[in-house]
Image: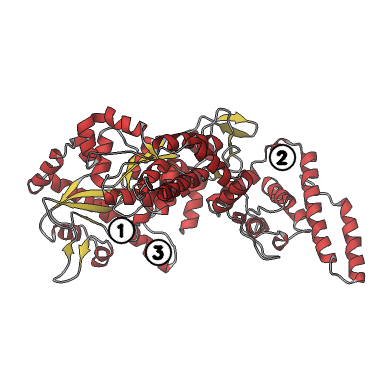
Amino acid sequence: MNYEEFKERVRSGNDIVDVIGRYVDLKKSGANYKGLCPFHNEKTPSFFVMQDGQFYYCHGCHKGGDVFKFLCEYNHMDFPDAVRELAETAGIDVPDKFDYGDAGRIKAGLKNRLRDMYKTAAEFYYKELHSGSGKKALDYLKDRGLTKNTMVAFGLGYAPAGRTALYDHLKGKDFTEEELKESGLFSYKTGGPKDAFFDRVMFPIMNRASKVIAFGGRILGTGDPKYINSPETPIYSKKNNLYGIQRAIAARKERIILVEGYMDVISMHQAGYPETVASLGTALTKEQADIIAKLARKVYLIYDADGPGIQAMRRAIPILKKAGLFVNIVSMKPFKDPDEMIKSEGVDGVEGRIRNADNAIVFELECIASEYDRKDPSENAEFEMKAANMIVELRDRFQREEFIKTVSERFDINKELLTSEVNRIGDETYKEGIIRRKQNPVIRRPEGVGSRIRDGDQGLPDERNVLLALVKNPKIFEQVKGYVSVEDFTTVFLREVADILFDKLNNGGTIQAGEIMSRFDNEEQSDLGRLFSNEMYDASDDRTKSKFVSESLKSMVMRMYDEKSENAPPDEKLRLMKEKNALSDLTIDINPD
């Protein structure tokens, strides 16, 4: 069985209404089901699940997709994990190997083996922590105030001092030398393979599905480097993961707290902040910011208050803002890390600091202010101009007003003067246009070149209507294909949808909207959800549906004739005009014999 066949078997074994119904309270609504959207706050249900098409769509936030995408979006899972979970739900055995072709089969098999290896390694390190050799590591963690439950929750362990302890253990579990080399757990520089981690406290790094994919290790005592981390492997990419992400997802909080290191995350979790994550010892990446943005709208940074910590925050702020997050900075002064802050002030004190956190603009201005001699009139004027420019970037007028008030008080700037300068710089039409173009650049395409929907071109309404009717009433295909072909659709996106539909129907296959949607990426799935979730069409009688598709097809074909006639010679133009006039009788029977 190849992977596509397995995936379709899993899809057909999981009714989307049953799956989504475990997470959302669904009520019958005509032929469909509806409920409050789980992806945005709403009081009136706009989230619909279409059982016939096996897909969902929200008319409020415009999220849509098939059963796999719902599980990925709701539980923040990777696609293979969603397929695996739904297979287990349906009682379908997951094959050890799929027919991906030779190269794909080797790659998939290696990934599965590495996942097994990291799970085995994590179990080994955990047992070592609680053995005699791990006493000093266990004592270190206890001295840091970690409870047994916390150590278990994070799977903390100990890598023995012996340089081949893990290697020998994994060789005894029948992992091959090639697999061990690919794992990143060993050094092969000189004198045979050696454990990359030894005599260190071990921090398993888990993905969004709580699977161990890497490790961080802290030295016991003094020495450099204090921490070492797993390298990139076929199952681990630093930029696409966050430490603590699996627990932050489960917490389902309205905010994310971003800290710097493993122990910072663990201390915050133990104090009652499961929404805390860290960026794995690297500078924050766009991909990590995007992960955070999927979980919450607000992010609170609690970084060290020293020079490197401040610089790290200043680098992170624009990345987080670009992901659409509201960024706040929590002061940790005079403490060196969250653990010390928690022990000194308790949970109430930490919560107070979070509640009184500075917005990123105020924090950035604090940093910039230190670079100016504000007693010097020219330098002070330059600083105040920077403050005005930063406030202008706020698109919301009410936010601007609040920040003018806050900034004028905090930095001793004349409020009237600051307001005047913000208004001068921020001419509404000009500034809003600039900001909008920066955030949503319009991509112009050459004349006659098709495009994906990402450039804002979602296809002409009549073309979309024809595709909708084909999905809803496949029996009309023989009539429709007498007038149009795949090439007659005017965007690449709609041609791809048409190609899937025409291929299926030409070969006598069945059509399900959810299956078609699974062939496209997230943005395109949402657009297809908007296309296929046409309640007016579903509620119409056959006569109305017949008129709908007939008029849409007629409009599409007439436009084709107009395009052909434009540069045609007179005789050909006359012939095309006669054929076009004959289209007035074009009728599609929604229930052909």
Question: How far, Cα to Cα, is label 3 from label 2?
Answer: 44 Å
Question: How far, Cα to Cα, is label 2 from label 1?
Answer: 49 Å
Which circle marks residue 113 in the picture? 1
Q: Secondary structure at mark 2?
A: helix
Q: Earlier in the sequence, mark 2 or mark 1?
A: 1
Left or right: 232 in relation to 535 = left
Above-or-below relation of 24 to 317: above
Closest to the observer: 86 or 398? Answer: 398
Residue 228 placement (x, y as % from top left): 22, 56
Query: Tags 2 and 1 in contact by the CB under 8 Å rule?
Result: no
Crowd rating for badge 3 (residues with CA inside 10 Å; few <14, some 14–19, many 20+): some
Crowd rating for badge 2 (residues with CA inside 10 Å; few <14, some 14–19, many 20+): some
Q: Residue at x 20, y 40 (%)?
A: 151
Which circle marks residue 105 in the picture? 3
Amino acid at pointer 3: Arg
> Which quadrant of the structure image shows residue 332?
top left
Residue 85 placement (x, y as % from top left): 41, 45
Which circle marks residue 54 in the picture? none
Left or right: 398 in relation to 264 = right
Residue 109 placement (x, y as % from top left): 35, 61
Amino acid at pointer 2: Tyr
Residue 538 placement (x, y as % from top left): 69, 38
Q: Nearer the viewer, mark 2 or mark 1?
A: 2
Q: Earlier in the sequence, mark 1 or mark 3?
A: 3
Query: Tags 3 and 2 in contact by the CB under 8 Å rule?
Result: no
Question: How far, Cα to Cα, is label 1 from label 3?
Answer: 12 Å
Q: Earlier in the sequence, mark 3 or mark 2?
A: 3
Residue farthest to the left, as pictured: 132
Q: Residue at x 80, y 58 (%)?
A: 559
Residue that carries the numbered disc 2 in the rendered image: 537
